Amino acid sequence: MYSLLFLALTSFVLSLFLTPQVRNLALRLGLVDHPDHNRKIHNIPTARIGGVAIFAATTGSYVLLLFIHLSAGHVIWSGLPFAMRLLPAVVVIFGIGLIDDIFQVRAWHKLLAQILAAMLAWASGIHLEGVGGHHFPTMISFVLTLIWIVACTNAVNLIDGVDGLATGICLFATVTTLLASLFHHNIDLAFATVPLAGALLGFLRFNFSPASIFLGDCGSLTLGFLLGCYGIVWSEKSTTLIGMSAPLLALSVPLLDTCLTVMRRYLRRQPIFGADQSHIHHKLLSKGLTPRRVVLLLYGFCGLAAIASLILTSTSEQYHGFIVILFCLSAWLALQHLGYSEFSIAGKLAFGGAFRGLLSARLDLLRFEQELSASTTIQQCSEVLCRAYPRFGFSGIELYLDGVVRHKESTEGWCVRVDFAGHGYIHFMRESGATSPGAATVLFIDCVSRVFVAKLNELKSQTSRYSDLSLYAHAD
């Protein structure tokens, strides 16, 4: 216990001392994050390599422990299995983060480095081996381990958008993991987490709003990576599926934000690795909360998540399902107030009949194109068009081709005109207030402007060629 207290105290003091030094060095070297009054809401250029101070404070506390006579010094020197074997992977993830802070690295390059670090973690013995006592095959375990670690790594990186937010969330998760390790007498995990908790607490003194230094990618990526690894070691003590949700709850805020981000960008057809202003903290800021209040509110939610995860890991299994369901319900109710319209619209499309209507329209379009392809005369093309347009919400049509009106029905409302140069036009009439899906109407007009007009040009070209051949034969 004295060794744990020593690690916590020394890492805390080192962090308090080193953070201002790293901040001043970053300012001298120009390694700062400039405000843009858009996504970056800070007022002045701010140092962005705070992860260096955390990394140095954490490793420095281990080094100091080696030179004193506490019993844990011998434990670490002989090889604290978890902390020491994990060091190469941590160096890789910290290194790519620091390079990105200095030179800017492409998203795919960072992802490849994260995968490499996760593979090194796997080689060091960090394995997500099974669920509820059922072991995964080696390959499945390997893939799931990589997915979990990479997801946690990016989750913390994405949530790092307000002063003190990512640092505080990681502090909650680290302390929660530390308490769980003490409860399960997991000494390796305790020695791995306690110096990180001290370093984060000291760093938060300078990172809380208004921050004078940011974590940077070297900090956020490393913290997410470590917490992902700690979560796997924590879950090894669980024998049930519900009990393994404890690490998930401890990291619920960044993981939830990441899941929402991926789903939002997928629904909007935006780049997954792009940037936007729809993270949870952005939504709270848009509702008028100050950055400090946003951070404190999310701290409160993290505190509840920490309590729930500790209850899961320390109480009998009969209440675990109720706790998980209650927490998920609370999170869902909270999300309703953030105004994510993408999910409500997607739900209406999926369950309100709009999706089926759009699917039916797509099938009708496919049939329309097939019938056009089979047409051999302009008259047949006109008949196919006249049979198709009512299915897309139009109540009338006027087809004008080479001075001849092929079909005409007049109605009140509004119309859409499609021209084909040198030959004529098509008017589609639609009654005001028609209830057919607007998307189907647009798809039909686009299809007509491409497929129908191309078919007419093809038939007229064939007719002209046959006419020329007939005249040539008559002259002979």
Image (tube, helix red, strand yellow):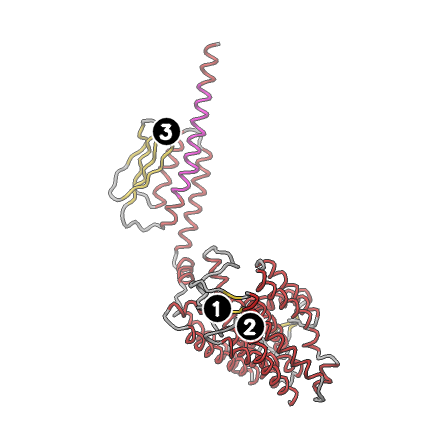
Q: Amino acid at mark 3?
A: His
Viewer-side residue, 435 vs 215: 215
Quadrant of residue 93 within the rendered picture: bottom right
Residue found at the very far front of the displayed protein:
28
Residue found at the very far right of the displayed protein:
78
Provide the residue designation for mark 2: 24
Provide the residue designation for mark 1: 161
Residue found at the very far top of the displayed protein:
476
Drawn side of residue 301 relative to residue 236, left or right? left
Q: Percent position (x, y) of residue 330? A: 44, 75
Name the residue rendered at 26%, 44% in the picture. Answer: 413
Viewer-side residue, 414 vs 94: 94
Q: Earlier in the sequence, mark 3 or mark 1?
A: 1
Viewer-side residue, 443 vs 160: 160
Screen quadrant of the N terminus: bottom right
Drawn side of residue 20 relative to residue 297, left or right? right
Provide the residue designation for mark 3: 423
Q: Amino acid at mark 1?
A: Gly
Q: Percent position (x, y) of residue 262? A: 50, 62
Q: Earlier in the sequence, mark 2 or mark 3?
A: 2
Viewer-side residue, 409 vs 253: 253
The answer to whether the residues at label 3 and label 1 have Cβ atoms under 8 Å apart is: no
Residue 322 in view of the camera: no
Quadrant of residue 25 within the rendered picture: bottom right
Q: Main secondary structure of the magenta part?
A: helix
Q: CA distance from mark 3 to mark 1?
A: 58 Å
The answer to whether the residues at label 1 and label 2 have Cβ atoms under 8 Å apart is: no
Residue 137 in view of the camera: yes
Name the residue rendered at 43%, 38% in the picture. Answer: 450
